[in-house]
Amino acid sequence: GVLMACPMNTYLEQELERRFNLFKFWTVSDKTQFLKAQQNNIRAVVGNATAGADAELIDALPKLEIVSSFSVGLDKVDMVKCKEKGVRVTNTPDVLTDDVADLAIGLMLAVLRRLCESDRYVRSGKWKKGDYKLTTKFTGKTVGIIGLGRIGMAVAKRAEAFSCPINYYSRTEKPNLKYKYYPSVVELASNCHILVVACPLTEETRHIINREVIDALGPKGVLINIGRGPHVDERELVSALVEGRLGGAGLDVFENEPHVPEELFGLENVVLMPHVGSGTVETRKTMADLVLGNLEAHFLNKPLLTPVV
Ligand code: 8YV
């Protein structure tokens, strides 16, 4: 049997039901009772950025063989426990890189050029009383990227097309790159106009955007988060935006999704997205096919398509 941790994609759910014995965890009323009853039947778990396979679930499923994540981020999978128990792990890298990087650029433009606010200005009829105010140029602004993996590199290439100088922070300096490396996030924030979070969420990167970094980015700086909500100390972010100590933010992820701090709702220099980075028809189908392909490969004893462990 395959346990699907939470609702994530209709096509994926339908195909899992068609090809496997599917258990939808979010429909189970008594999880403890369910796990006791099914513990020897569940051989696979399908998770995503919202719910996955934590140590408790992995320990409750002695026959678990594979966790296939409908996501590139694996922060909802206890990787140490999977390695300890010999549980294989797959994710959906590469296929979503372009969409997430596209959204990052879209958020930069939306915040600096006030695209959402301008749209509301027209719809409200305010244009009839006068022109919208002048906004901030994007082309040529310095972009600082935290994490220069697949998504970070894709954001950099896109920003270069807007003549943006690229600075970055990562744990180690990457060789043969024309981008300027900064050994700390604070130094990067002090040397860019737009700061992008594009690194995985780990214990080391939790709250990597803290008060010190926000103050370094400053009242003309813009934060773009296409990573995970917990990358940012959200209370510090909210107070900096409300008090004008930070120039703006484009956010696709939040610490307690789908709950978003309502203090942000009235701020015109903030653009809020409902975790849609990879949310296109094409990409989510490709991601789903990767999840299905990995599960089929596993059960047919063929090489996994995108193994992590
Ligand atoms: C997914 C994500 O959309 O890939 C990730 O890490 O956060 C998103 O691309 C999400 O997990 C799908 O439910």
Image (cartoon, rainbow, N blue to C red):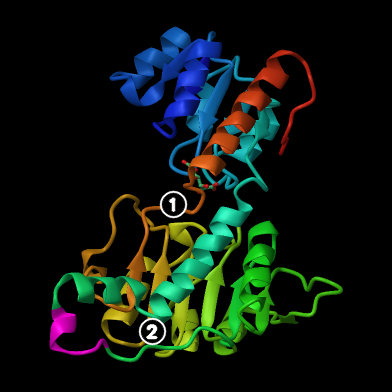
As helix, strand or loop, the secondary structure at mark 1 comes to loop
Stretch of the chain drawn in magenta: 126-132
The residue indicated by pointer 1 is 276
Determine whether 198 is above or below 114 in the image: above
Residue 285 x %, y %: 54, 35
Residue 113 visible at all: yes
Residue 203 visible at all: no
Identity of the residue drawn at 50% across and 12% down: 18
- Position of 279 with respect to 202 (left or right) is left
Res 118 quadrant in image: bottom left
Q: Would you call the spot at circle 2 few (<14 residues within 10 Å), some (14-19), or many (20 or more)?
A: many
Q: Nearer the viewer, residue 97 or 4?
A: 97
Kind of residue at badge 2: Leu
Q: Nearer the viewer, residue 230 or 282?
A: 282
Residue 130 belongs to magenta span:
yes
Res 300 quadrant in image: top right
Q: Nearer the viewer, residue 243 or 78?
A: 243
Determine whether 85 is above or below 282 in the image: above
